[in-house]
Image (cartoon, rainbow, N blue to C red):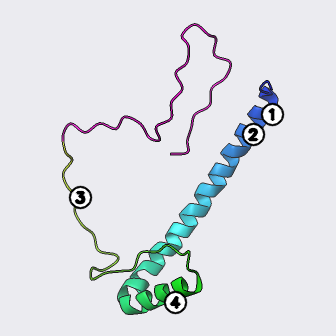
């Protein structure tokens, strides 16, 4: 089935608008989470209890349980190791022919 460029253009514009709204939603959720973080860090035992209770109600819940460090502690990053190279994000690739015309192109942003 050939690509319908009119539909594709509308879908790309819609995805762009949705991405802007999604980013705004994420920023609002991040601000709320950052407000709640010191409250949760103040009583780690209560946080562990809440996580255990939630895990008991939902056996598929995947959550970290706080250890001995404060959950809002800052740690220095390790120095970068020289010579490391990332070759691929997800292992997929498509090698285009240098002889064919490019009909269209999309970028995989799912990494």
Is 5 situated left or right of 56 in this image?
A: right
Q: Is residue 104 magenta?
A: yes
Q: Residues within 10 Å of mark 3 (few under 14, many from 20)?
A: few
Residue 94 is situated, as x and y percent measured from the top left of the image, at 54, 26
Residue 39 is situated, as x and y percent measured from the top left of the image, at 42, 86
Element under disc 1: helix
Q: Marks 4 and 3: which is nearer the front?
A: 4
Q: Which residue is mark 3?
A: 77
Give the mark, 4 or 3, whose residue is nearer the N terminus. 4
Residue 59, by quadrant, is bottom right
Front residue (pair 51, 24): 51
Q: Marks 2 and 4: which is nearer the front?
A: 4
Q: Which residue is mark 4?
A: 53
Distance Cα–Cα, label 3 vs label 2: 40 Å
Check contact, mark 1 vs mark 2: CB within 8 A.
Answer: yes
> Looking at the figure, which quarter contains the N terminus?
top right
| Residues in magenta, as a range | 82-111
Check contact, mark 4 vs mark 1: CB within 8 A.
Answer: no
Is 51 situated left or right of 107 in this image?
A: left
Q: Which residue is mark 1?
A: 7
Residue plotted at (62% across, 10% down)? 100
Q: Which residue is mark 2?
A: 11
Residue plotted at (41% across, 36% down)? 88
Give the mark, 2 or 4, whose residue is nearer the N terminus. 2
Give the mark, 3 or 2, whose residue is nearer the N terminus. 2
Check contact, mark 2 vs mark 4: CB within 8 A.
Answer: no
Residue 49, by quadrant, is bottom left
């Amino acid at each position: 089935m050939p690509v319908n460029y009119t539909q594709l253009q509308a879908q790309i514009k819609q995805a762009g608008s949705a991405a802007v709204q999604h980013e705004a939603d994420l920023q609002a959720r991040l601000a709320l989470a950052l407000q709640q973080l010191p409250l949760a860090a103040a009583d780690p035992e209560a946080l562990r209890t809440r996580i255990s209770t939630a895990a008991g109600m939902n056996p598929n819940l995947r959550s970290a349980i706080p250890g001995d460090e404060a959950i809002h502690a800052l740690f220095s990053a390790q120095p970068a190791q020289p010579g490391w190279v990332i070759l691929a994000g997800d292992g997929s690739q498509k090698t285009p022919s240098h002889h064919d015309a490019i009909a269209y192109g999309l970028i995989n942003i799912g990494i």
